[in-house]
Amino acid sequence: MRRCTRCGSELNERAKVCPVCGTPVDGERAHLRRMVVAMLVAAVVVAALLVVRSRQLGLGGAGVTSEAAAVAMWAPLH
Ligand SMILES: [Zn+2]
């Protein structure tokens, strides 16, 4: 028997939504979606950190543009 991820109520195997709280029942897909969202958030955070760091390097480095620093930092990751 499946259970609602929100309120824990027992769910009919064919139920599309929880009869108690109305939460959509799509177990595996909801889990996958959370994984994708988490990875996207992580990618955005890493990109933001790289941009900030490349700007700091650009200000401190002699003759090194922030764009070149960004490329140099991205290259090992790809
Ligand atoms: Zn529920």
Image (cartoon, rainbow, N blue to C red):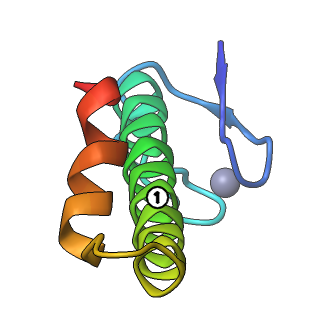
Q: Nearer the viewer, residue 45 or 8?
A: 45
**In percent of the image, x 63 and y 66: which residue is there?**
21
Above or below 38: residue 66: below
Could you say whether the residue bearing mark 1 is in a helix, strand or loop? helix
**Ligand 1 - quadrant of the structure image:** bottom right
> Residue 35 vs residue 71: left or right?
right
> Residue 21 vs residue 66: left or right?
right
Q: Position of residue 53 (x, y in %)?
A: 53, 69
Which residue occupies the extreme top position in the image? 1
Above or below 70: residue 18: above
Which quadrant of the rendered structure holds the C terminus? top left
**In percent of the image, x 68 and y 42: which residue is there?**
5
Label 1: how many Cα within 10 Å (few below 14, some 14–19, many 20+) = few
**In percent of the image, x 49 and y 55: which residue is there?**
46
Q: Position of residue 11 (x, y in %)?
A: 59, 32
Which residue occupies the extreme bottom position in the image? 59
Q: Nearer the viewer, residue 66 or 62?
A: 62
> Residue 73 vs residue 10: left or right?
left
- Which residue is tagged 1? 41
Above or below 50: residue 1: above
Q: Amino acid at mark 1?
A: Val
